[in-house]
Amino acid sequence: MTLRAILLLFDSLNRHCLSPYGCDWTITPNFQRLARHTVRFDRCYAGSLPCMPARRELHTGRYNFLHRSWGPIEPYDDSMPQILKQHGVYTHLISDHQHYWEDGGATYHTRYNSWECVRGQEGDPWKARVEDPVIPPHLGQASRQDTINRAYFTCEEQQPLAQVFHLAQDFLEVNRDADNWLLHVEPFDPHEPFFTQERYQALYPDDYDGPRFDWPDYAKVTESLSAQAHCRNQYGALLSMCDTYLGRLLDTMDRYDLWKDTMLIVATDHGFLLGEHDWWAKNRSPFYEELVHTPLFIWDPRGKAADTARSALVQTIDLAPTLLRFFDVDPTPDMQGHDLRPVLQSDTPVRESCLFGMHGSHVCVTDGHYVYMRADRPGKALYDYTLLPLHQRAMYAPEELRRLELAPPFSFTKDCPLLKVPMPRDFYPFMSCVEEERRDLLFDLDKDPHQLHPLQDRQQERRLIGEMVRLMRENDAPAEQFARLGLEADASAAEQ
C-alpha cells in the first residue's frame, strides 16, 4: 500500500473559533469541509506550552515542560521525522514560523530530509532598514521589525501564509505519485499580529475607529469594548484567510484523489485568549480551556472514518507515535504518546488523564471531565536540564552558566548526564504567573466549560493529585518539580 502523510500545523488556532466546534461568528467553511472528510477530536489537549516546547513534543512524543523551558531538540531526543527518514520515509518541512531559525529552535528543521523557510512573519529579522521606520499609532504591541516587514506584503500573494501553501502545492504537484513521504506544512498564522488583507477584514465589519489594534499585549484586558471586539475581528479575519488556504490544500487532495492513500492531520500547538478570563494572548497561567483544549482533525485512509467525532482524551504527544505507526515504524520506548488508530476506529480510549503546563508555572491534569491546576509554591528552586543551553533568541549568558551542576541521567536521556542550570522565576517575564493568579484551581468541565466557577471538592482534588503524581513519575520528573508544587513523589494522594 502506498503510504503518504500531510501534517498541517497552524499556530494559535482557537478551537472555540471554528465552526466544526460550534462557533457561529467566524467564517470557516473549509474547516467545516475538513470535518466532513475527517475524524474530529473533541477532547484534544496541548501538553507543553508555548511554541517550541510544543514542537519538541511533536517530535519526541513525550512531555517537555517538567524538565526544560524553551529550547532545541536535544542530542538524546527521539525525533519522529528523523526516525522516519532513517526508515526510508522522505520528510519535508515548509514553514514561515521564524522560531525555527532562532537559537532556541535551530535543531528542529535539520531532522528532516529537506526544508523550506518563508521569511517575514512578526519580528523575523528579515528586511534590512538602517533608519527607524515610523510606527503608526496603535494599541497593544508594535515592533520596529514587524513594521518593516509589513511594507513588503502589499498583496495577499506576498504574505507568508500564501507562500507556505504555494510551496506545499508545489511539493504535491512534484511528488503526488511518489511513495513514502511526510509533508509537514506549518504556517505561523493565525498567530498574532493579526495582519491580513482588506478582503478578509471586510468579512468582519465593526464600528471601531481607533488606532491599529491587531497585536494584543500579553496582559490584562484594559481596552474599550469596541476595541476588544475589533481585535477579535482581526483574529477572525486572519482565521478566514487560513481557512481559504486550507481549502486550496483540500482542493489538491480532491484533484489527485490523495484521500485514498494519504493521511491528513490538521492540528495546532495551543490556543489564544481573546479577552476570555479578562486576559489577552497566552503564556500566563492558569492555562484555561481556550489555551489548552485544542482542535484536531485526522483522516486515516486505512480505516476511512470521516464526518464523525471522537470523545477519547488525546494529546500532542500522540501525534509522533501515530505517524510512526502509520508508516509501520515502531515508536521508541521513551515515547509516552499513543498511536491514535484505536481512537480513530472505535473511540477506544488510550489514556485516563493527561498533563499540561509550562516550565516554571502551573502543572495541570485533566481526565477530560475535570481539570485540576496546581500552582507553584513561592521560593522553590527551578532548573533547566539540557545539553544545549539555548534560550529562545540567545545562548545562555556566561553568568547564567556559572552556577550549573552536572546532573545524573534521566530515564529518557540515553545515559547522558545533563547540565542542571538554575532558573530565576522571571526567566521569561511575559510567561510568568502574576501573583493574584498563583492559586490551585479545580473545574468541572462538563458543567462549567467556560471555567467561571472554581470547585471546592476535596475528593476530586485528591483523585486528580494522585493522577498528577503518577504521570509526573512516569515522566521521570525531577524532585524539585514535586517540591515546587508542594507534593511528594512517593506520597499517596490522600496525604497531599
Image (cartoon, rainbow, N blue to C red):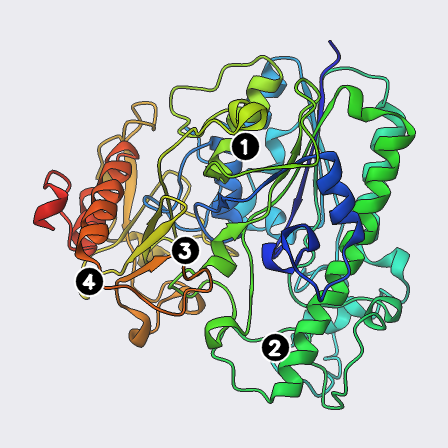
Q: Amino acid at mark 2?
A: Gln
Instruction: Return the residue at label 1.
Output: 319
Q: Amino acid at mark 1?
A: Leu
**Would you identify the image quadrant in which residue 148 lies?**
bottom right
User: Which mark is first along the chain, 1 or 4?
Assistant: 1
Is residue 488 rendered to the left or right of residue 306? left
Distance from disc 4 to disc 3, alpha carbons, whole Å, reads 25 Å
Instruction: Return the residue at label 4.
Output: 377
Residue depicted at x 82% and y 58%:
159
Distance from disc 2 to disc 1, alpha carbons, whole Å, reads 33 Å
Neighbours of disc 1 within 10 Å: few (<14), some (14-19), many (20+)? many
Foreground residue, 446 or 349? 446
Instruction: Return the residue at label 3.
Output: 445
Mark 4 or mark 3, which is nearer to you? 3
Residue 236 at x, y percent in the picture: 72, 66
Residue 386 at x, y percent in the picture: 36, 41
Distance from disc 4 to disc 1, alpha carbons, whole Å, reads 33 Å
Residue depicted at x 70% and y 63%:
24
Distance from disc 3 to disc 2, alpha carbons, whole Å, reads 33 Å
Instruction: Return the residue at label 2.
Output: 141
Q: Amino acid at mark 4?
A: Arg
State the residue lying farthest toward the front: 447
Residue 413 at x, y percent in the picture: 34, 28
Mark 3 or mark 2, which is nearer to you? 3
Is residue 347 rendered to the left or right of residue 188? left
